[in-house]
Image (cartoon, rainbow, N blue to C red):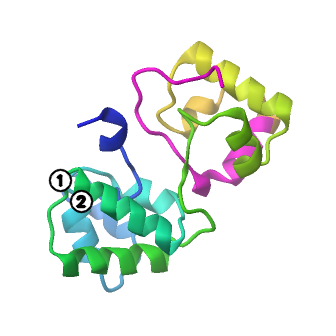
Amino acid sequence: MKTTAACLVTLCVSGFARTGFAQDVLPEASGRDTTVRICGQCHEAQKAASIKLTRPGWSEEIDKMKALGAAGTDQEFQAILEYLSAHFQGELDRALDMNSADAIDLESVLGLLRRESAAVLQYRGTRGPFSSLADLKGLDPVILKKIEAKKDRIVFFATKKADSKK
């Protein structure tokens, strides 16, 4: 299983060690328990709650998880889709991976200026892949503020080597 694919954090819900946290982060509604049970086998709740996607975006992510081996019935996956698309709805079909994003993506999705996106790519190239928003704290505060304002549009997939030359 590819590391990047395994770290798709769009359906991230922890069902074991962080069950109490999952309950705090995920709204109580139909489909929540199924989401925790099915998706919680691999991921943390805070990750799913941190991004917002369109319904087609969530559907695509669920299909990716199924292809990676997520086990459940069609009815369970439908319940997960309904839950995520109702409670974590956004404007994007796909979240921006900060470890593979190129300058154009950083500019168009996060609203960074060309020089700001270049600074992010240079920083990523110097320090290596990011694992969370906290890893961006070394950036210029103006750039960091712009990224934080759109944190519901970004994810941090694990990569062996971030491609920072784009």
Q: Name the image quarter holding residue 45.
A: bottom left
Q: Which amino acid does label 2 sit on?
A: Lys
Residue 108: image x %, image y %? 75, 48
Q: Residue at x 51, y 24 (%)?
A: 162
**Is residue 111 placed above or below 117 in the rendered structure?**
below
Could you tell whether 155 is left or right of 1 in the image?
right
Separation of marks 2 and 1 at Cα, in angstroms: 5 Å
Could you tell whether 76 is left or right of 45 in the image?
left
Question: Which of 49 and 5 lies nearest the eye of the viewer?
Answer: 5
Q: Which residue is drawn at 53% across and 56% down?
A: 94
Residue 50: image x %, image y %? 50, 57
Q: Mark 1 points at which residue?
A: 69
Q: Does the magenta stretch include residue 144?
A: yes
Residue 48: image x %, image y %? 42, 59
**Is residue 145 placed above or below 82 in the rendered structure?**
above
Q: Which amino acid does label 1 sit on?
A: Gly
Could you tell whether 147 is left or right of 62 in the image?
right
What's the magenta region?
143-166
Q: Mark 2 points at which residue?
A: 66
